[in-house]
Amino acid sequence: MLRDDIVEYSLEGHHSEEAGKTIRKKIWKVTAILTAITALEVILGSQIKQTSDYWEVIKWSFIALTIVKAAYIVLVFMHLGEERKALKYVILIPYFIFIIYLIFILLWEALAVGDIWAVSAS
């Protein structure tokens, strides 16, 4: 029996060789950018000790690089990069506000726990 609900997507991929080269170039560019950011995070995390004076800056750089990676993934893989600037802002600004809120809550609660530990230790 022949099914009519199965779509063969490989037959729908009608593009020229030039368009294919452009697509492959974009895929390699995205891969290189995400790999570079991840490699930078790994190098920073493995080379700088937690006891150093720079560790506070390193922690914030991890947060910033992770947000940059997440925004870039949304722009590329969800095809938000081709949309108008206003739509990008409508989607990304609440995301950044939510992330900043989560970081605030995380730090606020960490300070409260640290205060409780300081009181119970003395």
Image (spheres, rainbow, N blue to C red):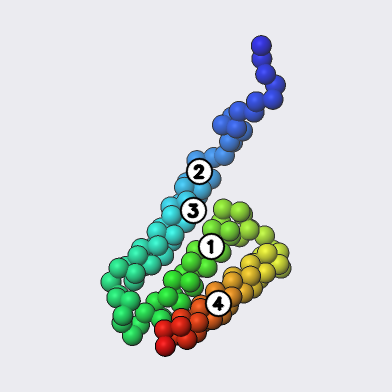
Residue at far top of view: 1
Near-viewer residue (106 or 88)? 106
Q: Badge 1 local density, few (<14 within 10 Å), some, or many (20+)?
A: few
Residue 37: x %, y % from top left:
41, 65
**Which residue occupies 67% across, 69% down?**
94
Q: Secondary structure at mark 1?
A: helix
Nearest to N terminus: mark 2 or mark 4: 2
Could you give the CA–CA distance between mark 2 and mark 3, rounded to whole angstroms? 10 Å
Residue 4: x %, y % from top left:
70, 21
Nearest to N terminus: mark 2 or mark 3: 2
State which mark lies toward you, 1 or 3: 1
The circle drawn on residue 26 is: 3
Residue at label 4?
A: 109
Could you give the CA–CA distance between mark 2 and mark 4, rounded to whole angstroms? 50 Å
Q: Badge 4 local density, few (<14 within 10 Å), some, or many (20+)?
A: few
Q: Please, what is the three-letter code of the amino acid marked with disc 2?
A: Gly
Residue at label 1?
A: 70
The circle drawn on residue 20 is: 2
Tags 2 and 3 touching, CB below 8 Å = no
Let me know if residue 18 appears in the view: no
Could you give the CA–CA distance between mark 1 and mark 3, rounded to whole angstroms? 17 Å
State which mark lies toward you, 2 or 1: 1
Nearest to N terminus: mark 4 or mark 3: 3
Q: Secondary structure at mark 2?
A: helix
Residue 111: x %, y % from top left:
51, 82
Marks counted in the figure total 4
In this picture, residue 4 sits left or right of residue 29? right
